[in-house]
Amino acid sequence: MKQSQGKDKGTGVPIGNKRPSRLRQIATMDFFQLHLVAAMLLGITAISGVSTYFDVLAHKHVLRNELERRTEWFGAGIQPQLEQQLAAGAANWGEVLRGLRSLPDQPALALFDSRRDLLGTAGEMPALASLPANLLERAIGTGREMDAFVHIQDNQDAPRLWLEEVMPVRAGTQKSATLVMLANADSIRAESMQIWKRSFLRIAAMVLLIFAVTLAMVRWFLHRPLKRTAEWLRRLRHGEAGAGEGVKEFGCLAPLAEEMSSLAGHLRKARAAAETEARLRNRGERVWTAERLAAQVRDCLGDGRLYVMSNREPYMHIRQGGETRCIVPPSGLVTALEPILQSCDGTWIAHGSGSEDSLYVDEYARLRVPPDDERYTLRRVWLTPEEESGYYEGFSNEGLWPLCHIAHTRPVFRAGDWQHYRDVNRRFADVLLEEMRETEHPVVFVQDYHFALVPAMIQEARPDARVAIFWHIPWPNPEAFGICPWQAVLLDGLLGADLIGFHLQSHCNNFMDTVDRVLEAKTDRENFSIRRHGHLSGVRPYPISVAWDQAAAAVERRRTANRGTQDGHDGVALTNRELGLRREWGIDDGFLVLGVDRMDYTKGIPERLLAFERLLEEHPWYKEQIVFVQIAAPSRTRIPAYARLGTEVQKLVERINQRYQTTRWKPVILIERSCSREEVRRYYHAADLCLVTPLHDGMNLVAKEFLEARRDGDGMLVLSRFAGAAQELEDALLVNPYDIVEVSEAIHSGLQMQRSERRLRMGRMRQQVKEHNVYRWAAEILTDLCAVRISEEAAEPVRGGMELEPA
Ligand code: ADQ
């Protein structure tokens, strides 16, 4: 342990060699700050300098106006007396002028006669001769008062500023003279200098203040987040920090950190996948991962392009809480097919059922997904409400769904629904054909009972396409399927596929029997293939499963080992959040039994509730010691049978609760909504026992999700014999869901089972799901699909002369 401290976990190189030294960090920061501060200082000084200059200019203007006004007033004041003296023919003008200029700070005076001869002066009149003669000339010429500021070089060192005001003086029409007043304007200059100085000091103080504030802001808003981000990135690199952990603390760098976080997430996943692959190669294990699946599919597709079709789309744009959100509907199918499409940039064709879907597509109803990492194309198909109701709710879910499940709900077949089903299948097939118009040898993977007619439509238009369809629900025996008035058309539609997949061998057998019974076709039970009109279809079981995240499982195992069982709950190491969840239902130390289903009559929810009621009846000491949480996502609510089921379940829950509840405890909690994947996972973690008791189910992913989620290796599964999953999970407590006593006793023995046995069973079941995960499911189907077609093409020259066999 000690040895690894201070080392880079990936390379074993001491961190000190790679990490920038504190000195270098400081130097980098200071250099950055210095530049920033210098630039700011320069900028602020320039702006302040220019603004001060204009300030001073404006002030100067005001002072000059003021001086001009004062000089004019003074001139106007002495003008009448001058005119009197002129009229009287005064002899000594020097004395007259000195008499008029009573105060020393009044302007100096000089009087010129009409011939421009100086008559007399008063006050300091420097360089009289150098006064701008043209001002005098112009004033005499125009007979108007004029003024100008002039610099006069007298015996001082520097030229001084003066205001020269020239004013005509008249006595009648005969006598005239011109008065020149010189006012010292040097004070304006001195005052301007004062303003410059004052402004400069103010600017200096302001710059200093801004400098300090900027520095503080840089340190607080940039330096600190930068340091934190750098530290977080370092920890992220060493795998010590979570991807999104504390991103909000990074201030203005949070968006960058979020991007980095998602990048790091991708890198970590890639690294984990590579490590897992390497480990598996070393151990010679055959566990499938998303990466391995992607590589396999790329390999077998070659130049071909993959097209997937399903009713449900992988990304939906919906309006929620006043904003549009892009959600991934909870579906095992998306988990399985996404890595394939992402790896080969395929096209997924699906019903655009989100309320805002049409706003996020181009003119061809396409968009690139995933939205934050565009890797493949989603082509949305639009349906009218009538089409949706006839094709989806009517024929698919009121007809085919109950037809294929032995749950004793009558299938309803209406001619109008069938018409819609055919039309919608045609529409989807046309869209697919349009999408693959320019692709040679496309590979098509159609999903489920919503599109039974599509394979033949594709086969007919594009014989070069390889087509597989996977039927996600059971296939009943020929007698049961014979109820459907259009069974032959459906079978012909399906036989357009090169490969028809079911969960179980028994479903394949039923399918072969049905074809034998209904169509003129050659069925081969040795190779499990059917030839109809010269086209060969393979029929194979591919038990679907869930994703298995090796890296996450390893992390969880380590965490569990560290936590141990210190929380005191026998064997199940619970996180605080999960403990909180148990407390919420008032059973800190008691048992949590869980059911997670769509609210569907095939899932056996009422029977399960009756079994739980019987448990309370038979073992009264469970009172206040047990809670059954049933999460039921509303499903197909517009179909009457589903609406009735909802009411029945609510009434049953009410009855049981009324019978057993106490003031602080309710035995059954019904959560009637679709929960997020994380929420469902929390329940899986917290549960002591998961009840999966469908009356009939193709596979049932909840059972496998529960096992995958139990990385602590504990918990028990009670599983219906009539779920496809029961074929693989022999270590579950298998029950007949109709047998209330058996289910009730299975719950009891599951809860009371020895910890060692429970863990042994859980370990074996987890191993099964790990080895037969959803990536393996997808890889096997696509590999078989490519192989079937290739071997047939290879045999093309001798077609008709020999029996072709799928590989
Ligand atoms: P479903 O009939 O839908 O699938 P299932 O396989 O159990 O049944 O899958 C249900 C999925 O929905 C699971 O992933 C589960 O976690 C999720 N889910 C259920 N209730 C939920 C809730 N309240 N909130 C959120 N998520 C919820 C059909 C066939 C099955 C077959 C699958 C896949 O009927 O037999 O296993 O397709 O092929």
Image (cartoon, rainbow, N blue to C red):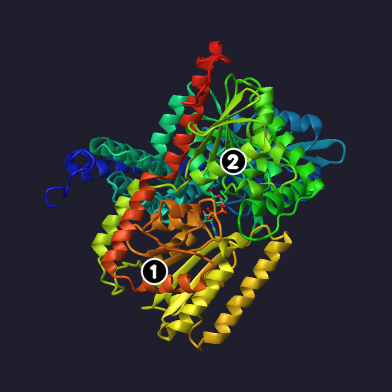
Taking 284 as reference, is 300 left or right?
right
Residues 205 and 531: in front is: 531
Residue marked by disc 1: 688
Residue type (three-letter) at the residue carrying disc 2: Asp
- Dividing the picture into quadrants, the one containing residue 592 is bottom left
| Residue at x-position 52% and y-position 32% | 153
Cα distance between the residues tagged 2 and 1: 42 Å
Residue 706 coordinates in the image, percent (x, y): 43, 58
Residue 80 coordinates in the image, percent (x, y): 78, 49
Q: Quadrant of ligand 1?
A: bottom right
Residue marked by disc 2: 513
Residues 696 and 531: in front is: 531
Extreme right residue here?
173
| Residue at x-position 60% and y-position 81% | 655
Taking 342 as reference, is 590 left or right?
left
For marks 2 and 1 on the same chain, the one whose residue lies earlier in the sequence: 2
| Residue at x-position 36% and y-position 54% | 765
Residue type (three-letter) at the residue carrying disc 1: Asp
Taking 728 as reference, is 763 left or right?
left
Mark 2 nearby-residue class (10 Å; few <14, some 14–19, many ≥20) = some
Residue 537 coordinates in the image, percent (x, y): 57, 30
Residues 506 and 342: in front is: 506
Which mark is nearer the camera, 2 or 1?
A: 2
Q: Is mark 1 within 8 Å of ligand 1?
A: no
Under tag 1, what secondary structure?
A: loop
Under tag 2, what secondary structure?
A: helix
- Dividing the picture into quadrants, the one containing residue 306 is top right
Image position of 269 with respect to 600: above or below: above
